[in-house]
Amino acid sequence: METVIIAEKAELADAIAGYFGVTSKERGVIHCGKHTILYSSGHILELCDPEDYNPEHTKWNLDHLPIVNVPWRYKVIKGKEAQYKKICDYLNKASSIIHAGDPDSEGQLLVDEILHHQKINKPVQRVLINDLNPRIVERSFSQLKDNRDFIGLSNAALSRSVGDQLYGYNLTRLYTLLAQKKGYTGTLSVGRVQTPILGLIVARDRLIEGHEKHFYYVIKGEFSIDGITFTGTYQVKENDPKDEKGRLDSKDAATAISEASSGKPARVTSAETKEKREHPPLPYDLLGLQSDAYRKFGLNSKKTLEITQRLREKKLITYNRTDCRYLSEEQHQDAPIVLKTIEDNCPMLGKAAAAADPTIKSKAFNSSKVTAHHGIVPAEGRYAVDTLPNDEKQIYLLIARQYIAQFWPVKVSEVTTVTTQIDNTEHEFKATSTTVISLGWGRLYTNDTDNDEINDTGEEASNNDLRSIARSQTGQCVSAVVHDKETKPPKHYTEATLLKDLRRVAKYVTDPKIAALLLDKDKDSKEEQGGIGTPATRHTFIETLKDRGYITEKKGYLISTELGREFHDVLPSMATGPDMTALWYEQQKQIEQQQMTIDDFIQSLVNQVSSHIEDMKANGLALKANTGPSCPKCEPGHLCRRKGAKGFFWGCTEYPACDATYPDKAGKPNLTPAKSGKETEFKCGECGSALVKRPAKKRGKFWFGCSGYPGCKSTYLEKAGKPVYKQH
């Protein structure tokens, strides 16, 4: 009998096989003596859909809501049937099993659900591997644990999965069906993460539209001290008139300060120079890479993810869906090999890689901060990077440069801060200068001038070197000029800025309890600070919002549509904010600690969803988007835009009772379409309108259609130049 190991990914299976020693391989299976390793490539099972439980639920119907499928069932994800069968065959033959999913809740669940679905009652051990380094794999197998110790973690992930499905299916069907009664023909989808993202975009757009500009004033003083000229900024005092951000908001006060300072003697009240040592930017996680790819190359997040997947398949980079920017300390030992691989693969970075010092250990190497996965770095696969498609090469160069930077010296600067005071006044001006002593890793980024991560000094620096200025030196304020500044609204979201904000949604939450829960959720993460969604899924929600017509992209900015705003406004605040993610986190933490059961969590959610469904059924949905004028053919109906096989058209909301249709013209119904063809003396047998003779597809043949189309759609065959009327 043998031990079967179920890994989450093929790369992990290969790493484990390297530890045990490969004896033979077949598709999806690696034999290592008494150990057989298989992998699932992510979730191999998914929760069944409503129609899998009850065929009647294939057709959406308000009377079916709420749909509650408890106990829930699983089905194999389409395309993964063959691998699932292999896993099951080996599990049934195994004497013992080792669970090798990723060391997080989803990794725990995706193997546990296979074991549960197959009703496996054999001994199961758990191995926790967050790095494919052979030394870490070896150490992990020396620290096997009982898989039963992780039941709480698995149940927490399961409750989230079941809850998301129950919440999403019911509310999506509810709002879609209610909207159809108003003439809307699309799908109004609701999701725990998707809908709060829409909420962020709508809120940002309205903040911009509602912005009321006002002015504030900045005073710039030009100083000459001991032959050195520099610019200082007036420092607002406690008793100065100022706005909520501490900026001067009185033109008269600013003018008075300017006049009291210009041409007056000045004295240096403080002068301090400090050394500033800057460490290189950490290796990329997926979100950071997506942001830089958009900033530098205009690649959207979906495209960047696809590119990294291709690079990973070419064994050029490590796992690409990570939300961590740190590397394990054991990975530092791989530096000489990885740097040499970059040098050989990529001539463009060859000199930079060769000049790197693999003995340097940057802050990135910190095992305590590595989560389920480490940062994205170059792998040891051999490939001529110059032969890659341009977009793949661009992304590889970003990842490789960020890795090389870890082995270059720190960037050293001297920052001098000088404060001057105008004689016989309390008016103070501050100036700073930054002098680079050693550029270090900064040499790799000299052309990256719009990179906030490496160029944000936090100070407005002077161009002149102020290090020689000392306290008590005197000179003159040559001039002091008032600069009128206008407050600006925030910018519309781009995909890159939205993705960054999704990491820090807590900052927009006014309820202190909800904000605290979101922050607590990410307390072990440096990059995530009260976020929603995951790096691997956030871009898919943005694409869904576009596909549903809730948002659109204009000149690179994401803008909410009329439909998106209307839909946002009819939803409860619980749905459009991150509250649900926060509250679910609190409950799932209790499930993980076995202080709450999944059944309790689901029942609470069922009660909440059921109550909302009943309220909405009773009160209806106030949605107007996508509807047009009243139907010319029937009184109660109105026209709505629909998409048919040949494009958009407008039809009556009372269909099938009313079958009126009209062509679409620039997004509006054309109620008086131009008539095609010449009217004949023959009359329509249904409505009496003149018939129009039209050519058939077959040359030399004709047919007759009613000139009252689309109100009347009667057609007639042609025989001997006359219409053939139907026989009654």
Image (cartoon, rainbow, N blue to C red):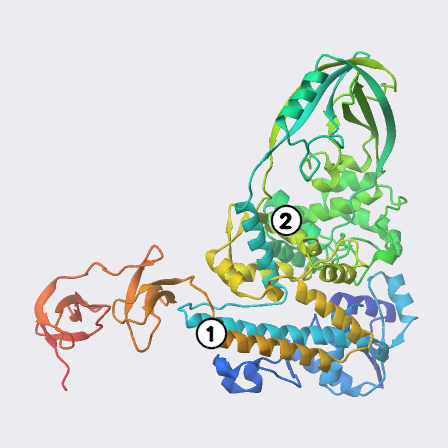
Rendering coords of residue 449 (x, y %):
68, 35
What residue is shown at x 23% (from left), y 70% (from top)? 711
Q: Is residue 478 visible?
A: yes
Badge 2 is on which residue?
497
Q: Residue 177 — which label?
A: 1
Q: The N terminus lies in which quarter of the figure?
A: bottom right
Identified by mark 2, the residue type is Thr
Quarter of the view holding residue 375: bottom right
Identified by mark 1, the residue type is Leu
Q: Is residue 493 left or right of residue 361?
A: left
Whichever of labels 2 and 1 marks the residue nearer the N terminus, that label is 1
Q: Secondary structure at mark 1?
A: helix
| Foreground residue among 560 and 318 | 560
Q: Secondary structure at mark 2?
A: helix
Distance CA(mark 2)–CA(mark 1) = 34 Å
Total of numbered circles in the picture? 2
Q: Please, which residue is most extreme toward the front here?
A: 239
Camera-near label (2 vs 1) is: 1
Quarter of the view holding residue 649: bottom left
Instruction: Reply above or below: 577 against 174.
Output: above
Instruction: Reply above or below: 431 against 209.
Output: above
Rendering coords of residue 39 (x, y %):
74, 73
Rendering coords of residue 51 (x, y %):
54, 83
Q: Is residue 396 left or right of residue 637?
A: right
